Image: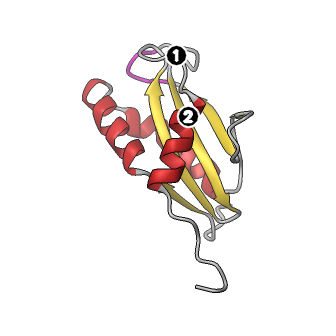
Amino acid sequence: MTDPSIEVRVTPNFERSLKRLSKKYRRIGYDVDPLIQKLRSGETPGDQIPGAGFTVYKERLPNRDAQAGKSGGYRVIYYILTESTIYLLEIYAKTEQTDIPLEHIRRIISEEITAPPTAED
């Protein structure tokens, strides 16, 4: 059952990466959709990235267009801002890039995500 109170948002960086990859991998939306559904249902798939300074996970997804399974598929980096808000930060094809530096992840969070309003706002 999906928890409607969990919102999955995308950063401009994620949108750019997805658009770039979609030119080569036409079915990327079908590959990413199950992850979004899992996040909306309250699951936190993947491995937490140590040393990021934030609650950030990396999930491996298969690439239907490359037929390489999860090992040669996509990597999605996502950030849990609050219990009810998750941001998709980055997506990349493992065949094109090995890993994302922690500094890149921190930059996306600091530049592209606004903090939730506080009680004083």
Q: Quadrant of the C terminus?
A: bottom right
In front: label 2 or label 1? 2
Residue 70 image position (x, y, % from top left): 57, 20
> Marks 2 and 1, how far apart in space?
15 Å
Q: Is disc 1 surrounded by few (<14), some (14 to 19) or many (20+) residues within 10 Å?
A: few
Front in this rendered view, residue 113 or 91: 113
Residue 115 image position (x, y, % from top left): 57, 66
User: Measured along the vertical axis of the image, is residue 32 above or below residue 98?
Assistant: below
The residue most toward the left is: 23
65 is within the stretch colored magenta: yes
Return the mark for residue 103. 2
SS class, disc 1 = loop
Q: Quadrant of the N terminus?
A: bottom right
Residue at position x 25%, y 29% in the image: 23
Residue at position x 45%, y 13% in the image: 95
Magenta region: which residues?
63-67
2 is within the stretch colored magenta: no
SS class, disc 2 = helix
